[in-house]
Amino acid sequence: MLIDTELWVICGSSHYIVPELGPEVKFSYASHKAVKEYQEAKALGVDTVPVFVGPVSYLLLSKPAKGVEKSFSLLSLLDKILPIYKEVVAELKAAGASSIQFDEPTLVMDLDSHQLQAFTKAYSELEASCSGLNVIVETYFADVPSEAFKTLTSLKGVTGFGFDLVRGTKTLDLIKGGFPTGKYLFAGVVDGRNIWANDLAASLSVLQELESIVGKDKLVVSTSCSLLHTAVDRINEPKLDQEIKSWLAFAAQKVVEVNALAKALAGHKEEAFFSENAAAQASRKSSPRVTNEAVQKAASALKGSDHRRATDVSARLDAQQKKLKLPVLPTTTIGSFPQTMDLRRVRREFKAKKISEEDYVKAIKEEINKVVKLQEELDIDVLVHGEPERNDMVEYFGEQLSGFAFTANGWVQSYGSRCVKPPIIYGDVSRPKPMTVFWSTMAQSMTARPMKGMLTGPVTILNWSFVRNDQPRFETCYQIALAIKDEVEDLEKAGITVIQIDEAALREGLPLRKSEHAFYLDWAVHSFRIVNCGVQDTTQIHTHMCYSNFNDIIHSIIDMDADVITIENSRSDEKLLSVFREGVKYGAGIGPGVYDIHSPRIPSTEEIADRINKMLAVLETNILWVNPDCGLKTRKYTEVKPALKNMVAAAKLLRTEL
Ligand code: GLN
Ligand code: ZN
């Protein structure tokens, strides 16, 4: 099997490697890790339920290998992969397993009848091998559409079905509409994707209702999904504010909640635990640190009305050009410059109060000056300050906004060995004071060239945080938008004429079902426009996005109404350009990345010029920008300097040919 290790896809809040499969693929039972781990636990006296990605979801979440015929269907590989599943099941049975769980999360997506039939076929074929085992098919992250629910609950040989009752808002009604007798219902009432303590009283009443439908001995209390997406243990947060801490449950606490609910159902309710939980819920509802009337009012006033800049983008670009006087194919970078060990040390020491504010400002100022001088030497047209004062593009803003809390050890896997520590948005968001004006104006004072003010957009802040669950996500997003809007306008007042508002994670918030895309995109794009709508025509608003795969949402991107968008592109087989080739009208500035910053490789001038030429074939010369794919934070100066030198040389070369 081919695995493209560069290709991580976002599924919920985390990423997975996408297998690339073709008709010739040969599957074999390679890793026996699952069985070994089952045995290891068993030897310790714990009979676990081994969990596997189900065969149909495995295939549906893969992608056809490069060069494979268009007519190739991933599901045609079902007959090839099922024998491997049978081998695994046989080995687990021999090891003494009593249950097995198959995760089939694709059942919550938009599936056609052909895809649904694959589930029926797969589980009929596995039935004989699985006999004697409890077989659970688990779904999560949304409710299962009614057709899929019928297919799922009719699967042969399956003894239990699992549902996400937190995000699956319609699941309860489906179950009420009919659940097969004699089967187990795994009720995911405890949120596996968030850090909030469960409302135990509310969950208990849902469970009691379910119990009356499926029967007392057939109801299993569960989390809504695996605990991979939440932090590990609240106990590791000794410094967190006590009140906020009482509102939280990390993985270890969620297990205790599940257990307490199950016991309560069985008639052994731990009254003290339940009343402590009720008190925490009540304190969260009434705490003055959660509610800020003024913010609530301002955010709800936004709903129902539109927010747009008064002038259209082409007129704005003209007005901006009069002021900025940029050459054609202007060059810029995405924001960050290499984060050296020294820089990290300076920030750490300042945080730990080991160095004075004066020394800290001096060190950062020196760094900004170095980055500015380097960009001038390289002859880049629109400069950045390099973001040396930022540890992370979300944390940096969260730390300066009200309504955010930070954990010391709340790490969650993002992909591979990469982990993130998302901030917790627990209350109404506001901006006590300007966040970036000090550094941006300092950087601008060092050069006569335009210096980009650099902000993270509201949707990205939202999508990379643990978000409060006591109001809709869009409301929280609007609040963040208002805070960032004030920052944009303060930057403008301070003389910054180009402001970049990064929306790296806009795509990550897309719901799993297409029918829900429009609603999300509508409020996400609206949030972005709230941020940018108040500036003058002559202020140029940039945005930046990662993960290139935008063809399906290009109209929403246009609707963000930024003046310039820089976008990751170089690893996407020019997919991005194909949208424009197909005739999408695009009038704003656009900078599809001309080289991949994820690799240490230094692209040559010719190679970059070639890339730009390909872009010029589909995009108007006067809207094209030249920039790398993303920020340069993770690269070394020995890579960044020659790469940018070649990038500028390529732009200059092409300018002479136009
Ligand atoms: N401005 C940020 C940087 O350059 C953008 C990072 C991102 O898109 N992930 O680092
Ligand atoms: Zn990026």
Image: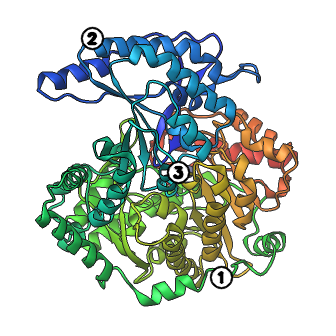
Vertical position of residue 550 compared to residue 312: above or below: above
User: Label 1 is placed on what type of residue?
Assistant: Gly
For the point 65% across and 13% down, which residue is it? 23
Comparing 18 with 286, the one in front is: 286
Vertical position of residue 590 compared to residue 282: above or below: above
Tag nearer the camera, 2 or 1: 2
Comparing 329 with 480, the one in front is: 480
Q: Position of residue 406 (x, y in %)?
A: 29, 64
Comparing 18 with 631, the one in front is: 18
Horizontally, residue 48 falls left or right of residue 304, namely left
The mark found on residue 653 in the picture is none
Q: Circle 3: is it few (<14), some (14-19), or many (20+) Cα within 10 Å?
A: few
N-term mark: 2 or 1: 2
> Which quarter of the figure has residue 129?
top left
The mark found on residue 534 in the picture is 1
User: Label 2 is placed on what type of residue?
Assistant: Ala
Comparing 488 with 356, the one in front is: 488
Distance from disc 1 to disc 3, alpha carbons, whole Å, reads: 50 Å
Horizontally, residue 51 falls left or right of residue 629, namely left
The residue under label 2 is 94
The residue under label 3 is 177
Q: Find numbered disc 3 in the image and state the secondary structure of the residue it sits on.
A: helix
User: Label 3 is placed on what type of residue?
Assistant: Gly
N-term mark: 1 or 3: 3
Distance from disc 2 to disc 1, alpha carbons, whole Å, reads: 68 Å
